[in-house]
Image: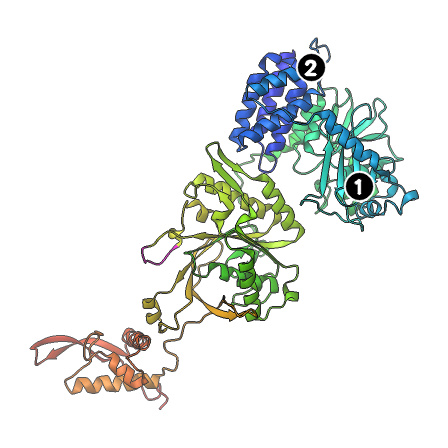
Amino acid sequence: MSHQYFRKIRESAVADISSAGQGRRNEALNVAAYSLGRHAHLDAANIDSTIIEMHAAAKAIGLQEHEIKATIGSGFQRGSENPKCLENSEQVPFQTSEMDRLIARLASKNLLIQDAETKKEKIAKAQAAWERSVPISRKNKDAVRPALLYLNSRGLRASAAAGIARFSPSLYDGPAIIFPATDPQGNVCGVQAVLLTPDGQKREHNKINKYSRGSLTGNVMRIGSDEPKTAIIMVEGPEDALSVHQAVSGHAPAQIICTFGKSGMKTFNVPRASDVTICADPDLDVEAVAEVLRGDGSTDVHVVRFDQMGSDTAKDANDYLREAGEDKLREALTLAKPIQQVAQERVQGERQWPTEYVHIDPADIPARRWIYGQHYIRSNVSVLASAGGVGKTSLQIVEALAIASGRPLLAEPVHERCAVWIINLEDPLEEMQRRLVAAMIYYEVTSEEISGRLFLDAGRDLNMIFVKQDRDGISVNDEMLDYMISKVTKNQIGLIMIDPWVGANMISENDNIAMNAAVGAVRGVCDVTDCASNLSHHIRKTNGEDATIDSVRGAGSLVGAARAARVINKISQEEALKLGVSEHESQGIFRIDDGKANMAPPAAKAVYRRLVGVQLPNQEYVGVVTQFKMPDLFDGVTAKHAMAAQRIVGKAEEHGDPYRENMRSKRWVGLAVAEVLNIDLDKPSMKARVRAIANKWLATNVLKVEAWADKRAGREVAIVAVGEWITGEEAGL
């Protein structure tokens, strides 16, 4: 019996690890290791092989070797300190000394890493923090004011926290509200602290606003009666626990259990034959939790989902309390569904394919949420690629200023004014500041216009790595992603610009699988926060040819994952001449081509930009991207000019000395065009303009090429003749 039960636990643990998604992989491994430690005595002979299975599963989802061993070691240790006893089982849990020897043996075999700090030491630190804190009540409101203000902001009264939470005036350099994690005997084994400002807002210490001390795994915060048969209500967070307590107090006896996170749900020892209600966040695997809680099947498990109670924003009990009030929260708890019903509804909602198409009114389809031009769209990734030194970074700075200020600085529409986060992993911060200030000076953008809407981080030492690749495989930096999600959400950032993309990853850029993982990591941030992102990348050498979307360096999956992609090319002297721009005027001009526009039609024609020098107060000149409109070759050219050219061409033919189409000919038709327009053909740019005008007139039958009998040559030659004569009325005569 015990062997079979252990096998079931092992299979479930390995499956949980294998299916863990981004952001909770280490958590899944930790929970699995804890569960293994709790049940290790049931099948001691197979511990080694079980750990090897867990290790392989963790490796397969991208966790690193050292991280795997350390997590298994700490989780296994904590689980062993809270062993699971089965009824009617003769198996006796390991004694502490036995477990210590087992862990030492597993560590020596390089299967795990022993926890450096003992459980006793961790608990002592937690207890010390708890003892230094003071109770929360209205009686000492002046002393605990930050905590009361925090509770009030969460819709909670002081009475809800009285005798439960405490206040520390000086935890990590400031005030904090502290929640206890106790063992079954009521001993404090760990604490969770929310760091506060004096006015009751959350604050950060080392970029973290919530700290845990001691041993939380296997321990919980208990509120209410622990009498047998008392209904149990389980929540993840302490604020949720206080919310439920405030709602049910005086109405129905219940013990409220806060597990300090999803993993704690599976590690709490529920008394047999209990009635348990899980207040589930949308991302909680309630069926997996219920499988553990039900034990031998005598425990009834119910589930309440606040996001399914008609609320648009509520995800947990505290959200629902603030939105709907105490009475509605209490009512929601009474509407909790049996876990069997929840499982049945899930199965019914899954794999109901194929789905018949039902007509959708086009007016009901929401518009795509473009932020700027046809380049940045919420919840999607864009790519901007070019060779180095062309103007890619400067372009992004001006586009960021346009979005943050809401002004179309480059004549492209700003569909949504929002906050922009520029992340440059190549240039020093000072250089980026120079470029930003220069652009603000040129466009007269004030600091007030972009206050709170523009964020700038730069430098090669930022260590912003999304994905790593080594001989152990590909691993996603979940901690970095979680941090970015929190910051993007907090600052309501609509667009993230990462430049260069290669600086944000440690992967082979030619590996499609690795690149998919890297782009997927950023896309995950976009999905969660509903922001847009732009990844700046380099192009491979093109041997003098213009770069296209196919020139983007590395794996094609980068462009494949993008919903919009642009390529920048510096215009050549030849292209400048064709466009009627002198060599001097062409300096700093570049062309932007739509390489891909999955969600918008490609631009009708290329867009041109120009870098101009802007002098800073320190007398330095910095390049700023400006709008550049290519000269109109026909600017000032009228039908009257075309008629005059026709007369010159016609007379030349009558006199037996017609014009030719070839530019190298002494009788090139461009000579007639230049004469009419008074253009100096010694200037290359002007010569290019004349050629373009002549070609246009030939293409529109103002002039035409025809065969002509050359008497001197004794053969027919191709000449330029008059096409369809322009009338005096057309010429305005």
Give the crowd class for mark 1: few <14, some 14-19, many >=20 residues within 10 Å: many
- 2 or 1: mark nearer the eye: 2
Q: What span is colored magenta in the figure?
A: 543-548
Badge 1 amino acid: Ile
Residue that mark 1 sits on: 177
Residue 89, compared with residue 31, is above or below; it is: above
- Residue 733 position, x and y percent, is 35, 91
Q: Which residue is drawn at the image coordinates 57% and 19% (left, top)?
A: 108
Residue 408: give its label: none
Residue drawn at point x = 41 percent, y = 46 percent: 556
Q: Nearer the viewer, residue 10 or 463?
A: 463
Q: Amino acid at mark 2?
A: Ser
Q: Magenta segment: does it hold 546?
A: yes
Q: Tell whether position 585 is magenta.
A: no
Residue 722 coordinates in the image, percent (x, y): 24, 81
Quarter of image, res 694:
bottom left
Q: Quadrant of the N terminus?
A: top right
Q: Which residue is at 70% across, 16% downward?
A: 96
> At numbered mark 1, what does the secondary structure look like: helix, strand or loop?
strand
Question: Residue most toward the bottom?
Answer: 733
Q: CA distance from mark 2 to mark 1?
A: 37 Å
- Is 53 or 108 nearer to us in this picture? 108
| Rendered view: 27 above or below 96 | below
Tag 2 residue? 97
561 w.r.t. 641: above or below? above
Q: x and y percent of residue 316 in the render?
A: 73, 40
Among numbered discs 2 and 1, the one appearing first in the sequence:
2
